[in-house]
Amino acid sequence: ERKKVWEKLTPDEVEERKKRKKELIKEKVEAKQAKVKRLREAQSSDKSNTIIIDLEFGQLMTESEKRSLAHQLNYCYSNNSKSEKPCKLVLCGLKDVMGQEISNLSGFEN
């Protein structure tokens, strides 16, 4: 299907599409770099708000509660990273049960 569409395009149209694709990729890279810069600035700044979450109570939770909390933390990280003014997120107590649960989520290493 896509091949048929490309075959019908003029050389100028093909070039225009390739140019637009390069522009979109460049925009995505720049947006990602800006996001990383905002997060690094928030982590190193004394002026940004800090949220500290103590996770040392994992042994008192059921498996379902641990999974739910891990997903909620992932959601918090995701929304914070998209924020125009992100805050510092500090997770304490990751050596125990909750650390294992959270490390199973993709993107935790960030």
Image (spheres, grey):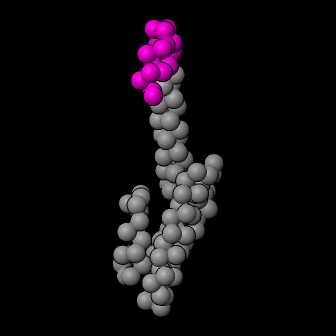
Quadrant placement of the N terminus:
top left
Image: magenta residue range: 1-19
- Image coordinates for residue 68, horizontal then vertical, percent: 52, 75
- Image coordinates for residue 48, horizontal then vertical, percent: 60, 57
- Which residue ends up furthest to the bottom in the rendered image? 60
Q: Quadrant of residue 76?
A: bottom right
Q: Is residue 9 above or below residue 98?
A: above
At 62% from the left edge and 62% from the top edge, which residue is drawn? 49
Q: Is residue 63 above or below residue 72?
A: below
**Residue nearest the observer in this picture, 66 or 44:** 66
- Image coordinates for residue 86, horizontal then vertical, percent: 59, 55
Indicate whether residue 5 is drawn in magenta.
yes
At 48% from the left edge and 88% from the top edge, which residue is drawn? 61
Quadrant placement of the C terminus:
bottom left
Indicate whether residue 11 is drawn in magenta.
yes
**Residue nearest the observer in this picture, 8 or 79:** 8
* Prevalent SS, magenta region: helix
